Amino acid sequence: MSSSTAQIQLDLDNDHGAKLHFAGDWVEGSATPEYLDFRPQLLASAPNTLVLSGEGLGEWDSIFMAFLLQLCNDCRERDISIDSAALPASAHRLLQVATTVKPHKPPEEDSPPLLATLNPVAMLKGVAEGTRDSLAFMGEVTVALGRLAVGKANTRFSDFLTFCYQAGPNAFAIISLTSVLVGMILAYLGAVQLQQFGAEIYVADLVVIGMLREMGALMTAIVMAGRTGAAYAAQLGTMQTNEEVDAISTMGISPVEFLVVPRMLALVAMMPLLTIYANILGIVGGGIVAGGMGITPLQYINAGEAAIDSAHIFVGMLKSFVFAVLIAVAGCRSGINSGRSSAAVGQAATEAVVTAVVYLIIADAAINILFQQLGI
C-alpha cells in the first residue's frame, strides 16, 4: 500500500473474525474512502469481531475519527465487537471517549388508541394538569408584576412600546373588517325577526347593546387570540429553540419579567382601545343594514344613542381587560413551555390559540352570568 494514499483492507479469518487495516494519510483535503462505500463489504462478511489496525497509517485528523465513529456505531447495532488497541494511542483514546455513551435516539411516539383519547378520566386529568400549569404561570406573572410595581423588574419600556404597536395599529385592518361585518350580521338577524312586528327601529338597540356588551369585546379577543396570541407563542417558542431563553436565565434575568410582562401589558393596554374601535365600526355596519330597511341615519343615531348605557360600556371594557390577560397568558405560557424543534413551535402556536379561545368562552359565560345575577 502507498504511504500517502488513504486505503482500507478487510481481511477475514476462519473464526468468523476480521481485521481492518488502515493505511495512508487520512487528512482534510485528501481522497479518503467513504464509510458508506465500505459498509456493504462489512455487512457481507458479517464478522463476530473486528480488529482495527493502524500499522500503515500516516497522518490523520477528524476525517479518520469520523470514519471510525460511523464504523463503531454500525458495529454496535449489529453486535460486532471491536478491538481498537492496534490503532495509534491517541486515536484509540479518542474513540473510547466518543463511544462511551450510546448515540441518542429520540423515543418513538406511538399515537394513543382512540378509546384512550376519549377516556373521561384521562381528559379530566389533562384539564387538571393544564389548569395547574396555567395557575402556576399566572403566579409567576403576578410576582413579576409586583416587582415591576416597585421598580425592580427587568422589563424594558422600549419592548412595551414595540409590542403595543404590533398589537394595536397593526391589527386595525383585520379588526375593521370583522367589526363591520359583525355589526351587519347582528342587524340583519334582528331585522328578520323585528320586521314581522313592524319594529325595525329596534335594530339600532340590538346592534348597539350587542356590540357594547358582547360582540365588540368577544370578536376582537378572538381575532387577537389568533393573531397576537399565536405570534407570542411562536416568538417565545423560537427563542426556546435557539436557547435564547436559557441565555437570559443564565444572565440572572427572569424570562417572565423580560419577555412575558411587556407583551402582556401591551395587549392589556391595546385591547380596550381596539374594543372601542370595534364597537364604533360594528354600529356603523349595523347602520348600513338599517339603511336598507328604510331607517334613516338620523333615526338610527337617535335610537342607538338612547340605547347606550354606562353599564353596557362598563361590561364591554371589563371583558376586554380580562380577555387581554387570558390571551397573553395562553400565548406566552405555550411559547415558554415549547419544545426545541420547529414542530414544537408550531404545536405551541396551535395550543396558544385553542387554549385562548377556550379561556375566552368560559370567561365570557362567567362574566355574563355574574352580571345577570347582579342586575347589571
Image (spheres, helix red, strand yellow):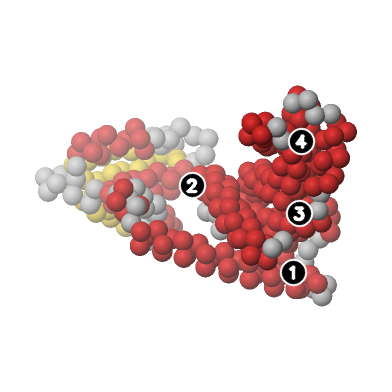
Q: Secondary structure at mark 4?
A: helix
Three-letter code for the amino acid on which mark 2 is drawn: Ser
Which quadrant is home to the N terminus? Answer: top left
Graded by Cα atoms within 10 Å as few (under 14), some (14 to 19) or many (20 or more), the crowding at tag 1 reads: many
Q: Is residue 351 above or below residue 247?
A: above
Residue visible at 65% across and 61% down in the picture: 372
Sequence-first tag of 2 and 4:
2
Contact (CB < 8 A) between labels 1 and 2? no
Q: Amino acid at mark 1?
A: Leu
Report x, y in % for residue 125.
Answer: 41, 64
- Residue in front for this viewpoint, 276 or 205: 205
Write the residue at 70% across / 56% down: 319
For residue 312, the mark is 3
Q: On the rendered structure, is 59 left or right of 154?
A: left
Residue 19 horizontal side relative to residue 328, left or right = left
4 or 3: tag closer to the N-terminus? 4
Q: Secondary structure at mark 3?
A: helix
Q: Which residue is mark 4?
A: 201
Q: In this orientation, does residue 145 appear?
A: yes
The residue wearing badge 2 is 62
Image coords of residue 313 (percent x, y):
79, 54
- The amino acid at mark 4 is Ile
Please name which of the two marks, 1 or 4, marks the residue nearer to the observer.
4
- Identify the mark nearer the N-term, 3 or 1: 1
How much space separates mark 3 and mark 1, taking CA atoms? 29 Å
Residue bearing mark 1: 145
Q: Foreground residue, 280 or 269?
A: 280
